[in-house]
């Protein structure tokens, strides 16, 4: 499988972390979503701007979390800068 192509700039992806636990997120470009596997919370990306507000985070249910986790090969890990 080929490397996913980010729609967010690589420099931004290298520094993005969860605003609550300050750990890396999983970026799903096709879904415009940043996902925290540790807390099962997600942050949307609107107009190529990550909405990293705790109050705007989406709680991810178990079945959707499993679906996301099965597609980690399509994601990019953020905060690796």
Image (cartoon, grey):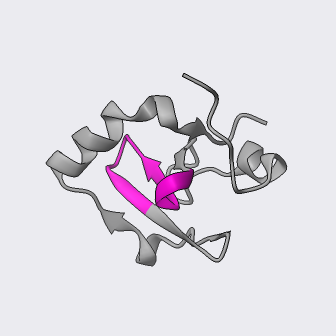
Give 18 or 32, whichever is nearer the viewer: 32
31 within the magenta span: yes
Rendered image quadrant of residue 59:
bottom left
The outermost residue toward the right is 11
Q: Name the residue rendered at 34%, 67% in the picture.
A: 58
Magenta extent? 29-42
Q: Is residue 81 above or below residue 15?
A: above
Quarter holding the N terminus? top right
Q: In this view, does 33 lie to the left or right of 41?
A: right
Asked whether 35 falls inside the magenta stretch, the response is: yes
In which quadrant will I find the C terminus?
top right
Q: Residue at x 44, y 33 (%)?
A: 72
- Residue 7 appears left or right of 65: right
Report the front residue among 58 and 33: 33
Where is residue 44 shown, x and y percent of the image? 49, 68
Q: Where is residue 21 in the image (x, y as percent from the top left)?
A: 50, 50
């Amino acid at each position: 499988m080929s490397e996913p192509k980010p729609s967010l700039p690589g420099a931004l992806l290298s520094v993005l972390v969860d605003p609550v636990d300050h750990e890396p997120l999983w970026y799903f470009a096709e879904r415009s979503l940043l996902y925290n596997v540790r807390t099962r919370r997600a942050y949307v990306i609107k107009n190529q701007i990550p909405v990293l507000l705790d109050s705007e985070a989406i709680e991810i249910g178990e079945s959707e979390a499993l679906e996301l986790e099965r597609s980690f090969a399509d994601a990019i890990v953020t905060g690796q800068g």
